[in-house]
Amino acid sequence: MAGRFGKTILELGGNNAAVIMEDADLDMALVGSVFGAAGTCGQRCTSLRRLLVQDSVFDAMAAKMAKAYSTIKIGDPLDPNSLVGPLKTKIQIEAFKSCIAEAKKQGGKVLYGGTVIEGTEGNYVNPTIIEVDGNADILQHEFFVPILFMVRFTTLDEAITLNNNVP
């Protein structure tokens, strides 16, 4: 018998995904998705990186996400009103820009963000949402920047396959 039951978390390779089916409460899914993807500026292993959304509600969810992202307070991470702080290093700024450029080369479409915030002290970027095909190579990599990839799917089986299709 265990003398102490401790909470655990498993890091199983990153590129975490959430699956949103057409019967989901989109407002509830929105709250968790925004925090999971943008909180800590996407710089933790447990950040939400892929949002798999059933095609019938994809456009509605994408619009909700973009609207929510437009209200995110970016700033000093010690300010309790800030959700997104700076990236750790200038190298991460380059990774952010490179990731966006590569996603676009692979047919990705920026739905929100995609820019560096110039003229501030620190490494600030706008949290970004990019729609990509579920088989895009960019989804195979973990970047540790606030970029959320939204992927359309039709059936639950397809979503499970997409979810499991990363290292």
Image (cartoon, rainbow, N blue to C red):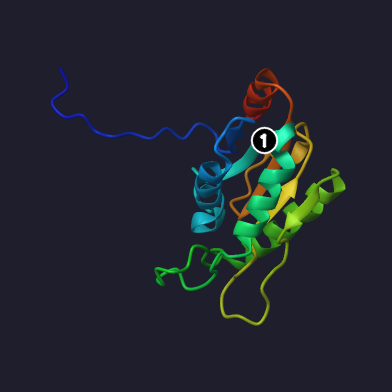
According to the image, label 1 marks what residue?
Answer: 53
Residue drawn at point x = 53 percent, y = 53 percent? 43
- Label 1 environment density (alpha carbons within 10 Å; few <14, some 14–19, many ≥20): many
Where does residue 27 sit, x and y in percent of width and height? 55, 46
Quarter of the picture holding the C terminus: top right
Residue drawn at point x = 24 percent, y = 33 percent? 6
Quarter of the picture holding the N terminus: top left
Residue 154 as seen in the image, left or right of residue 68: right
Q: Element type at marker 1? A: strand
Residue 20 as seen in the image, left or right of residue 137: left
Residue drawn at point x = 65 percent, y = 30 percent? 166
Residue 156 against residue 118 in the figure, above or below: above
Q: Quadrant of residue 93?
A: bottom right
Residue 58 against residue 98 in the figure, above or below: above
Front one among 54 and 38 = 54
Q: Quadrant of residue 90?
A: bottom right
Residue 24 against residue 117 in the figure, above or below: above
Three-letter code for the amino acid on which mark 1 is drawn: Val
